[in-house]
Amino acid sequence: MSDTETYTPPKVWIWDKENGGKWAGLNRPIAGPTHDKDLPVGRHPFQLYSMGTPNGAKVTVMFEELLAAGHAAEYDAWLIRIGNGDQFGSGFVAVNPNSKIPALMDHSGDKPVRVFESGAILMHLAEKFGAFQGRAEDRPELLSWLMWQMGSAPYLGGGFGHFYAYAPFPMEYPINRFAMEAKRQMDVLNRHLEGREWILGESYSIADIAICPWYGRLALGEAYEAGEFLSVHEYPNVIAWAERFFARPAVARGRMVNKTFGPPETQLWERHDAADFDTQTQDKLQDKG
């Protein structure tokens, strides 16, 4: 069907497994596991099951920032290949019944605790270590921006990103609809960041860690190759903020973890020790050579 044809919804919706483009095989109208598969468990208190998408990068950046700040936040990061449907394995579903990355098992207390949804994981770690929360009086602002990101990013990713980059064929109405919303959101950020170094002002926080992997990538032209299409040059405050964020060494390390795309030197499929950033990256460069 072309985007100029009229679509009339049927009286009862029926799942068409073949419809949906690149990610059609991963989407289904039911929850629960599709196969039995236990999750690996490493030696550190925190076991992360993820992939290096923007939502996954939020958490690995947080861990690397915590470690850089001297906190005892050692973690194992296991790769969940969402393209292969690893998120539908029984072990993963037990940690996250929503079958989305990232998912965390916290073994640091008396009983293991599961945490899913990236924003919840950031809050859990920030509260556990008393870090990257800003001042006490900043908490309402912090929570407001964290919830803003969780509610807004689906319009950028599943909305604009899907229809612009991944849909079976280009469709004018949804691309225009979500491009407008993506630009509105960028304008929200650009106006807020006027005269501010970070989302909370002078304090670097989980608000920045949550938002920048999504909107910073877009501002720097990394997301969906849509920088020119969305005229991201119109948002100089977002661009400057993103450049500050991505220049942080802990952010650079966190962005590598569980990443399976891009140049080999930017990928670290699994992270179990700080030395992995050197050894595993070199292995990939040698394999490429």
Image: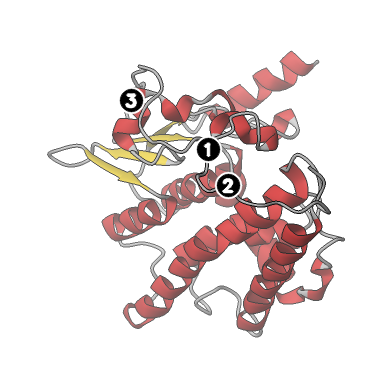
Q: Hey, what amino acid is under mark 1?
A: Ile
- Residue at the right extreme of this rendering: 228
**Which residue matches tag 1?**
14
- Please determine whether, in this image, residue 2 is positioned above or below residue 260: below
Q: CA distance from mark 2 to mark 3?
A: 37 Å
Circles 1, 2 touching at the beta carbon (< 8 Å) = yes
Q: Secondary structure at mark 3?
A: helix
Q: CA distance from mark 1 to mark 2?
A: 8 Å
Instruction: Provide residue 275's location: percent of width, then percent of height.
Output: 52, 29
Q: Residue at x 65, y 61 (%)?
A: 215
Circles 1, 3 touching at the beta carbon (< 8 Å) = no
**Which residue matches tag 2?**
10
Instruction: Provide residue 23's location: percent of width, then percent of height.
Output: 63, 34
Q: CA distance from mark 1 to mark 3?
A: 29 Å
Q: Residue at x 52, y 78 (%)?
A: 202
The nearer-to-camera label among 2 and 3 is 2
For residue 96, the mark is none
Q: Residue at x 72, y 28 (%)?
A: 264
Q: Hey, what amino acid is under mark 3?
A: Gly
Neighbor class of circle 3 (other Cα within 10 Å; few <14, some 14-19, many 20+) is: some
**Which residue matches tag 3?**
91
Neighbor class of circle 1 (other Cα within 10 Å; few <14, some 14-19, many 20+) is: few
Q: Hey, what amino acid is under mark 2?
A: Pro
Side (left or right) of 151 relative to 186: left
